[in-house]
Image (cartoon, rainbow, N blue to C red):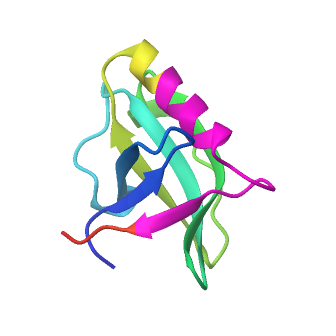
Amino acid sequence: MSNYLIFRGASGAGYSYMPLSRAPLLKGRSGNYVLARAGDSGWEIVSAGEAPDLGTAPWPDPAADEMVLIRFNVSRSAREAELADLVGGAEGGAQQGLRATG
């Protein structure tokens, strides 16, 4: 897996997420997070959220085939808009993700 995964929102915009395990210091940093599962055709969002402080966010408990990924977003309005775009693009509760190339 590369350092980032790109998830497409309903608008077609791509959002780069990094695995929580590779994230730098989180305390005081705001952003979005997804719980994703690897599928046959890419990564699917199981659940998603946003937090004003990722260092204190209550992370979902990932299953063996799942992973928590994060994306830093300072602006509350940007976090909320991104979350709405990602969730709005979900069909049947899952959003297909594309692997990043870098």
Residue 52, quarter of the rendered image = top left
Residue projecting furthest to the front: 12
From the viewer's perspective, tell me whether residue 61 is left or right of residue 6. right
Q: Quadrant of the N terminus?
A: bottom left
Q: Does 91 appear above or below 77? A: below
Residue 48 visible to the viewer: yes
Q: Is residue 58 visible?
A: no
The number of callouts visible is 0
Q: Determine the residue positioned at 55% across, 34% down.
A: 85
Residue 94 falls within the magenta-colored stretch = yes
Q: Residue at x 47, y 51 (%)?
A: 8
Task: Point out residue 86 in the picture as x, y percentages from the top left corner.
Answer: 56, 41
Instruction: Out of 99 and 56, give the one closest to the viewer.
Output: 99
- In the rendered image, the quadrant that contains the C terminus is bottom left
| In-front residue for pair 93/71 | 93
36 relative position to 13: left or right: right
Magenta residues span 80-98
Residue drawn at x 32%, y 31% as measured from the top left: 27
Q: Residue furthest left?
A: 102
Against 85, is 45 above or below?
below
With respect to residue 69, does 50 lie above or below? above
Give percent across and percent down for residue 24. 22, 48
What x and y, as percent, mark residue 31? 39, 32
74 versus 22 height, above or below: above
Occupied quadrant, residue 4: bottom left
Residue 26, position in %: x, y? 31, 38
**Is residue 38 part of the magenta span, yes or no?**
no
Outermost right residue: 92
